[in-house]
Amino acid sequence: MSSAKVKEFLNSPIRMLIDGEWVAARSGQTFDTHDPATGEVLAAVPLGRAEDIDLAVAAARRVFDAGEWSAMRPNTREKLIWRIADLMDSYAEDPGELESLDNGKSVGVATAVDVRFAAECFRYYAGWPTKLTGTTNNPSMLLADPAQGVPRLHAPGARRRLRTDHPVELPHPHGGPEDRPGPGHGEHGRPQAC
């Protein structure tokens, strides 16, 4: 069951955005993407090859060198990237539904995890234009280990696997023994980082 917006998107020709234009692959080739639950073809997607990548890279380089972005003040860039994240959050249900159809996750998990994490990545990178000082900052994203500066593959208190072939685990909604204070646990009952 798909929303009207998602059905409209899937029934429209899928294109690649290159140099400000929605285009087919130069070769004209496509590949089918399938709903893993039903095997049904969701859409025919352009099969981008080296010539498409070369066009995209050349367009990006040209726009970067001569366009507004590279001359823009860092705080203005930050606001624009942050706005992308806000828009992703505002419209999260549609890409969440598409992600669910494409990979078989539940719509709720695809929306709450995949789309929201993607928005948080934009927020993280939004801060970089004003902080390019040669140092690194720890991400403040969910599952990011502040000591490591990278997302963890297994969250403290993880209980249920989302898929057998997917390494990311989410905390059990009611907590577990790992969520209670005890030996080897830090503040708020969370396991201490090794």
Image (spheres, rainbow, N blue to C red):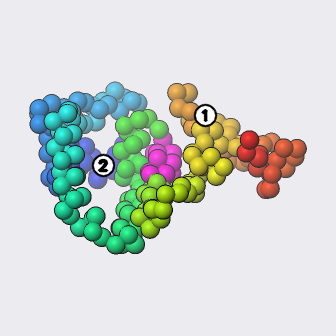
Q: In which quarter of the image is the C terminus?
A: top right
Taking the spot 79% from the left edge, 56% from the top edge, the residue there is: 188
Identify the secondary structure beneath mark 1. strand
Q: Which residue is tagged 1?
A: 161
* Residue 91 falls in image quadrant: bottom left
Q: Is residue 157 left or right of residue 94?
A: right
Q: Which residue is tagged 2?
A: 6
* Residue 157 falls in image quadrant: top right
In this rendered view, identify the residue nearer to me: 37 or 68: 68
Taking the spot 87% from the left edge, 46% from the top edge, the residue there is: 182
In whole angstroms, how far apart are the C-alphas of marks 1 and 2?
Answer: 28 Å
Q: Where is residue 50 in the image (x, y as percent from the top left)?
A: 20, 33
What range is drawn magenta here?
106-118
Q: In this view, does 2 lie to the left or right of 105?
A: left
Magenta-drawn stretch, dominant element (helix, strand or loop): helix
> Depth-wise, is mark 1 or mark 2 nearer the camera?
1
Q: In which quarter of the image is the N terminus?
A: top left
- On screen, 169 above or below 60? above
Q: Is residue 16 visible?
A: yes
Q: Is residue 120 left or right of residue 97?
A: right
* Residue 170 falls in image quadrant: top right
Q: Where is residue 130 in the image (x, y as percent from the top left)?
A: 44, 68
Taking the spot 39% from the left edge, 30% from the top edge, the residue there is: 36
Q: Where is residue 118 in the image (x, y as percent from the top left)?
A: 44, 51
Identify the secondary structure beneath mark 2. helix
In this rendered view, identify the residue nearer to me: 143 or 101: 143
Residue type, mark 2 in image: Val
Q: Can residue 82 be seen in this view?
A: no
